[in-house]
Image (cartoon, rainbow, N blue to C red):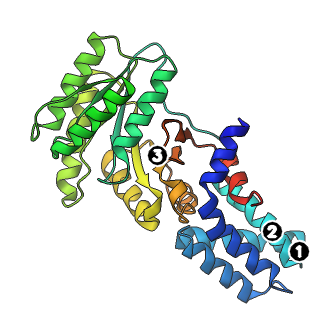
Amino acid sequence: MVGLFARLKDGLSKTRQGLVGKVEELFTGRKRIDAELYEELEDILIQSDVGVDTAMDLVEAVRAQVKAQKIDDPAMLTDVLKEQIAAMLGSETEPLNLQEGSLTVIMVVGVNGVGKTTTIGKLAHQLKAQGKRVLLAAGDTFRAAAIDQLEIWGSRVGVEVIKQQEGTDPAAVAYDAVQAAKSRKVDVLIVDTAGRLHNKANLMEELRKITRVIGRELAGAPHEVLLVLDATTGQNALSQAKLFSEVAGVTGIALTKLDGTARGGVIIGIMHELSVPVKLIGIGEGLEDLREFAAGDFAAALFESR
């Protein structure tokens, strides 16, 4: 567990420097707590991609605590902010909704380039390491490269991929995959989907059709609709989360590339502004660097002394 926390802390180093470093500099450079300090704190939070609404709510929460506790030393505000961020993130860890003793279907959505295929591959590896039989479905038939990439990952982690030719109806691939998963007594089926956003209506209809077909072939499925977001895109990630939540019934979020960005603060905005939990985070290139999101660990690692 120590190793996991150390890895998380290391992965959040750029966000810690960009957000917490600036906050600490602000607080230690001031003699008193005033309106100007709160304005500058709000600016830092917004620049760190926490989001305008979330930044305003955080500053108001800090202001309320300062008043309630009669705090007059700006140096004490770092701990107050940490407590408010932790409260906003919550303390509960929400694992993937895996069906014990029966087939679980996870549908993965998200735009191209966010690390969707990599996330699927790493998740398949980790589930397989837990002793589960895993099957992948190449439901992004819009790009031949997407099918090839999924096959590469399937080969790498030793998991079979159900596929059809480029241009095939994705729902037909999903149908074949569910049938194959049931006949082979698979524990988890992970279904990839197309990530194009140029036509919201087409995307909506395609995802609905895939969901409908999966649900028809297996009652209660998909059990998880996992949205993959790229932390390096900052506020764009929050916009994508809102869109896919509207069109795909997202049940959980996987936030990738946290180790390569100072914009990890977006996770606070996502958790605060959407009623969708972050379930997985990517903090490195390794197979083990996709990990379950634990809000308490995240807040602690974010504010841990460098």
Q: Are marks 3 and 2 in contact (CB under 8 Å)?
A: no
Residue displayed at 11% across by 39% down: 166
What amino acid is labelled 3 in the image? Ala
Q: Quadrant of the C terminus?
A: bottom right
The residues tagged by marks 1 and 2 sit, at their Cα atoms, a distance apart of: 8 Å
Q: Can you tell which quarter of the image residue 102 is in?
A: top left
Is 229 placed above or below 26 here?
A: above
Q: Give the number of the disc on residue 71.
A: 1
The amino acid sitting under disc 2 is Gln
- Give the class, few, some or many, for how many residues have Cα within 10 Å of label 3's Cα (few <14, many ≥20): many
Contact flag, marks 1 and 2 (Cβ < 8 Å): yes
Label 3 SS: strand
Residue 90 appearing in the image: no
Q: Examine the rendered structure and indicate whether residue 231 appears above or below residue 22.
A: above
The answer for how far apart the CA atoms under marks 3 and 2 are is: 32 Å
Left or right: where does residue 203 sit relative to residue 66? left
Regarding mark 2 in the picture, which secondary structure is present there?
A: helix
Q: Dot 2 corresponds to which residue?
A: 65
- Residue 209's disc number: none
Q: Secondary structure at mark 1?
A: loop
Tag 1: amino acid: Ile
Q: Where residue 254 is drawn, which disc sits there? A: 3
Q: CA distance from mark 3 to mark 1?
A: 38 Å
